[in-house]
Structures are given as C-alpha cells and as structure tokens.
Image: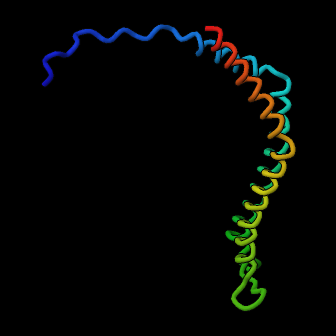
C-alpha cells in the first residue's frame, strides 16, 4: 500500500470559459434558420422513406405469415415468391442507402459544411480571445 497518499481530493480545475463559449455557440447554431432548413430537408427524406420501407417490410412479414399459398408459388426451378420477396428486401435496403447518399450529397453536405465552418471559426475566435 502507498503510504504517501494525499488525504484530500485534488483541487478541481478552474472553470473553462471555452466550454461555456462552445455551449453558447451550439445554442446559437440550433436557433439559426439555416440549421432548421437542414433538419427540414433531412426529415423530408427520412420520414417518407422510413414509412415506405416499413410498409414494404410488413407486407413481406404478413405475406409470409398469412399468404403462404402465394409466397409458396414456384416461379421457376427452386425459386418461389418468398425468395424473391426476401431478395428484394435486401435490394431495397441498399437502394434506399444509395438514394439517401445521393440526396445528402445534393441537399446537405455543402450547407452543413458552411454551418460547421462558421461554428468552428466562431469557437476558434472565442478561444483566441482568452
């Protein structure tokens, strides 16, 4: 056991004004109309796509549970409707990811970079004042 242990807790570090400035900058950014526009554009894509995918997925699950005759219909060889539905689930997932990437590149990335740079410059300027 160590005999030279301090008996008191160490002194806490002094208040960091940079953290307070950072918090104020983030709050200001959240009230910026450009930030709200970014969120609106994001939600305009995410909600309809999520609803569409959930309906598509639930159709697959419900058809597998209650439409066994239809899902068991052989299309050719050993391939039936259920297998095609399952493969289309994977394809639609990747398709949505690709669509989102294209949508984000076109609608978010440049605007978000401008806001991020402004926020970073504001934070760097306030930290330089110390």
Residue 37 in the image: above or below residue 8:
below
Residue 94 rendering spot, x and y as whole percentages: 74, 61
Residue 14 in the image: above or below residue 33:
above
Residue 77 in the image: above or below residue 94:
below
Numbered marks: total: 0
Q: In the displayed image of the protein, which residue is found farthest to the front? A: 128
Residue 2 rendering spot, x and y as whole percentages: 15, 22
Image check: 102 left or right of 121?
Answer: right
Quadrant of the image occupied by residue 39: top right
Figure quadrant of the N terminus: top left
Of residue 127 and residue 44, the one placed in the foreground of this image is: 127
Of residue 82 and residue 94, the one placed in the foreground of this image is: 94
The residue drawn where x is 40% and y is 10% is 12
The residue drawn where x is 33% and y is 11% is 10
Of residue 129 and residue 5, the one placed in the foreground of this image is: 129
Image check: 59 left or right of 15?
Answer: right
Quadrant of the image occupied by residue 67: bottom right
The residue drawn where x is 72% and y is 72% is 87
Query: Please, which colouring scheme is shown?
Result: rainbow
Quadrant of the image occupied by residue 42: top right
Of residue 38 and residue 10, the one placed in the foreground of this image is: 10
Residue 75 rendering spot, x and y as whole percentages: 78, 86
Figure quadrant of the C terminus: top right
Residue 68 rendering spot, x and y as whole percentages: 71, 76
The residue drawn where x is 72% and y is 18% is 122
């Amino acid at each position: 056991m160590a005999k030279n242990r301090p008996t008191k807790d160490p002194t806490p570090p002094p208040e960091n004004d940079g953290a307070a400035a950072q918090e104020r900058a983030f709050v200001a950014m959240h009230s910026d109309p450009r930030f709200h526009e970014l969120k609106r554009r994001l939600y305009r894509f995410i909600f309809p796509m999520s609803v569409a995918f959930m309906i598509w997925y639930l159709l697959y699950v419900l058809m597998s549970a209650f439409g066994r005759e239809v899902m068991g219909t052989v299309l050719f060889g050993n391939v039936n409707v259920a297998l095609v539905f399952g493969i289309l689930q994977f394809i639609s997932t990747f398709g949505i990811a690709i669509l989102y990437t294209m949508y984000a590149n076109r609608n978010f990335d440049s605007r978000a970079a401008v806001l991020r740079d402004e926020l970073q410059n504001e934070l760097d300027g306030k930290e330089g004042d110390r």
